[in-house]
Amino acid sequence: MASDVESAGSTAPDLEKRVEERFGVLPNFFCLAPETPEITEKLWGFAQSAYLDNPLPSLFKERLFVYLSRFCTVRYCIARHVGFLTGLGRPSGDAHARVHSAEEIVGLLQRPFPRGHELELGLSLCATYPAPLVEMPSADSQIEESVFALAGHVFLQTPRAPACLDALERLFGAVRLQYLLLFLAFVRAAHYWTKVHPEIEYEDDIKHLLATHQALANCILSDPEANLDNIGQSLLDELPALRLKADKAIGLLAAIVDSSDDAIISKTLDGVITTWNAGAERLFGYTAKEAVGQHISLIIPINRRDEETAILERLRRGERIDHFDTVRVRKDGTTLDISLTISPVRDAAGKITGASKIARDVSQRKRIERSLHESEERFRALADALDTQVQFRTQELQRRNAEILHQSEQLRDLSRRLLLMQDEERRHIARELHDSAGQTLAVLGMNLARLAQDTSHDPVQLAKDVKDAQDLVQHLTKEIRTTSYLLHPPMLDESGLSSALHWYVQGLAERSGLDIDLEIAEHFERLAPEMELVIFRLVQECLTNIHRHSGSKTALISVAREPDKIYVEVRDHGTGMSQERFAEVQSRGIGVGIRGMRERVRQLHGELTIESNALGTRIFATFPAKTPPAKGQSTIQHLDVA
């Protein structure tokens, strides 16, 4: 006996030291009467293996300990373990575990214990959650809330405990589930130990915690779930009668639901299917086993997934959706038209927890409606087509009449312009012949007349008169040849553009006194005949205008080519055109010469730019190097001769 007392005296302080080292404090739970130290040692060993050294995460174990301790009528366990969570000691003996605020713990303690439909939602979530869990649930997550609820039913051994145990085994796997059950066994033992030892008092740190945190104290000391053991027992006593009534009600409801031709489906607010009647099996082709636990998107076409988001938002607001026509997809991939009526499902407290929907096949009605939408469309399309054809033919006739009128106007304008151009050419040629050849012929006539009347027969005078007549004939021949060359220089056909331009510029400079600078490559390659003629006429027209109208004493001509472009530039330093005159020329192409230049350039698909100001005038033309044959080119070309 003496040795036993000595052993007890030496063992108790050693045990308390080990406990305090592990928890950071010495809980009164392990400070019972010293007469049974071996029992305390065994209790500590059980706490170590089932609680402290259990491989489940420390924070998960401590939060679950607090959650389950709500159901114990003695409040020591919940108070002590709430203290661990707030930093009064180490949660699950872990010095590195995160400390909780009082508000976080109040949120944990105020969770209602799920029963009925709320429990079914938790079971559905666990049934659809990816398993086995890679990581244990984080604090305050939805999956943690569901796991705690299922563990609570297993802990209390409610009628739904087997289903909850199966769901936990799926989530945790066989090994971790055994560690969870071992942990639950220790929590149950701890609750029992505090009930049979009412002398266990709160530690001073816990008394101070309850005194300084009123909301936390209310949750610990006034938790309505504290009497759950008594309530649970009364429920178990009444369970057979309640189950009989429930079975009758459920059987009647199931018969009504299963006999319905409509699909009747319920789902969570996250869209997870929880019930699926026979009508749904017939309509969509999935059995209840295949559908329950799946997301409702199982039967929603991809292009209509946004509908479900909008529906769930309306349900969360408590709205009912009546006769919503939409399209859903069957198991075999075919689509069908349905009409939906969707209502929010509420718990006893009025909180919306899910939705119930009735789906009715309206494919036949839709086919009839579509057949009538289609018949009307065909008649409407036929009428619209006839009206469109009448309008089109009318517009076509109007367009053609307008084109004919426009073409007639163009022909009349072209005829008028051709006549004007012909008259102008004739007038110009007549003026040139009158001014040059006419005068020469008149002098020649007078000389010949004087020669015929001369009777002196002076050989010297006669020779002189004949020589003068010969000079006049040669001059006349030169004038006629020049005029002929200006009308169409044969050198253009024989030697090309470069030679023709040099000949023309040299002659004009001699006749007009203009200082003309011509820039063109010495060996400028031959162009198409029609392009060489157009460029020659363009330069000829520009120099004529410079000589007659600009007042400039100089002119610059540049002809250059690139692989795909021909460039022609004529520039003077004369008075230019006024802004009003230049704007009028640009907008309307006024002037026979300018109009002729534009027309010639356009026929070769080129572009003509005219710039004029007080510093002079610049005319710039570009031509494609390979020009398609000009269409409709006039056979009468305008020419102003210098």
Image (tube, rainbow, N blue to C red):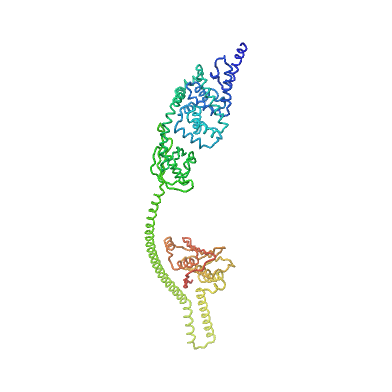
Tally of numbered tags: 0
Percent position (x, y) of residue 482? Answer: 51, 75
Furthest toward the top, the residue is: 2
576, above or below 416, in the image: above
263 lies above or below 372: above
Image quarter hosting the N terminus = top right
> In the displayed image of the protein, which residue is found farthest to the right?
3
The answer to which of 288 and 503 lies nearer the viewer is 288
Residue 243: quadrant of the picture: top left
Tell which of 637 and 396 is nearer to you: 396
In this orientation, does residue 215 appear? no
Along the line of sight, the residue nearer the viewer: 496 or 131: 131
Can residue 423 be spotted in the picture? yes
Residue 156 on image: x %, y %: 49, 27
Residue 191 in percent (x, y) is at 51, 22
On the image, the x and y values in percent for residue 319 come to 39, 39
